[in-house]
Image (cartoon, rainbow, N blue to C red):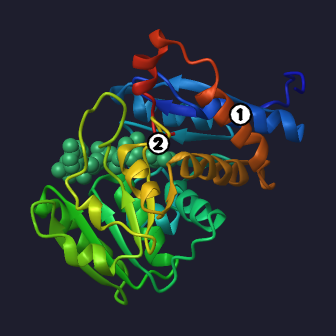
Amino acid sequence: MSTITGQTKVTGIIGYPLVYTLSPIMHNAAFKATGLNYRYLPFVVEEKDLGAALQGIRALKIRGVNVTMPHKEAVIEFLDELSEEAKIVGAVNTINNRDGCLIGYNTDGTGFIRSLREESFDPKDTTAIILGAGGAAKAVAVSLIQAGASEMILVGRDIRKLEKLKARLLDNFTYITIKTLSFKDNLADIFRVGDLIVNATPVGMRESGDLLPVPLELISTKHFVYDLVYTPLETELIKEARKVGAKVANGLGMLLHQAASAFEIWTGTSAPVEVMRHALTSELEGGEQPNDAKKKDQRLPT
Ligand code: NAP
């Protein structure tokens, strides 16, 4: 890795509590592989200090940062500009510092689409079923519409939240058909028409013990099942879908490609995706000790 000098550009992640994040591993591996004189560091920022931290990014000429829980929405008021996606989603996971002008991006959705395409799935003219109505569901929904999905079915446990998300999407995109359904509704018909099923809830994460309240028996070879969860790498949903021959993907691809997009925003050069993937999978798969398991369950999405 290049030596730290007066020219080293600093990037990092702001969040609280920053218990465990995979981003430093991916980004520092990418900087090392490309020979760019950059470093990526964790910055633990409490909510009360968010404004000061953003001013600090300007003052210290930090090149850019990722933003994670709980600041993804709150950070917006401290930024100078927002990308189109960040505006529509209402959340930022990447900030670029262009000579003191802080621009907010949301690369979660871009990362999701990049990873779908890597799996040879083209969302154009497809019907997508999204389970969940939180931040990730929002980013995924926006990016799928932008990528040409023709119909979207939002499924969740809080119908008011789903209707709010639907209204927000329709405010920005008039050419998509959107339905909302509760997990308690009969989901058989939508599973018959859906092409892509995305789990954007934490259900399936290690130790949660929950099973998604959806008709898993209706998943078939026609479906692409994408679980945003990546701990464990094989959730019950993925296992069931794999059993019946559906195409499947876990959340690693999205995690990887949101980071690759951030790398490209900061450096202006293509990300060494394979290097980043290797760093990520080595960390996740290699040498996990029983005592680390609990700590890793608190892993942040970025
Ligand atoms: P979030 O904003 O907290 O939203 C979570 C959503 O899941 C909410 O709609 C919530 O329902 C729903 N939910 C929670 N528990 C549920 C349960 N037991 N049954 C049914 N629905 C439930 O979280 P998020 O940021 O969107 O993240 C969601 C998941 O995606 C997490 O597992 C996260 O790790 C993962 N993620 C992965 C990536 C990646 O790069 N792979 C990126 C971002 C997120 P209510 O609306 O009723 O509260």
Type of amino acid at the residue the image marks with label 2: Glu
Task: Identify the residue at image location x=46%, y=9%.
Answer: 291
Is residue 257 rendered to the left or right of residue 112? Answer: right
Q: From the image, tell me which residue sits under label 1.
A: 279
Label 2 crowd (10 A; few <14 / some 14-19 / many >=20): some
Q: Nearer the viewer, residue 63 or 168?
A: 168
- Quadrant of res 222: bottom left
Task: Identify the residue at image location x=64%, y=30%.
Answer: 24
Residue 72 visible? The answer is no
Assign the N terminus to one quadrant of the image.
Answer: top right
Q: From the image, tell me which residue sits under label 2.
A: 234
Whole-percent x, y for residue 86 in the image: 46, 60
In the image, is residue 146 above or below residue 8? below
In the image, is residue 179 above or below residue 110? below
Q: Nearer the viewer, residue 32 or 255?
A: 255
In the image, is residue 12 above or below residue 247? above
Mark 2 vs 1: CB contact within 8 A: no
Task: Identify the residue at image location x=87%, y=23%.
Answer: 5
Is residue 134 rendered to the left or right of residue 225? Answer: left
Direction bottom: furthest residue = 175
Label 1 crowd (10 A; few <14 / some 14-19 / many >=20): many
- Quadrant of res 28: top right
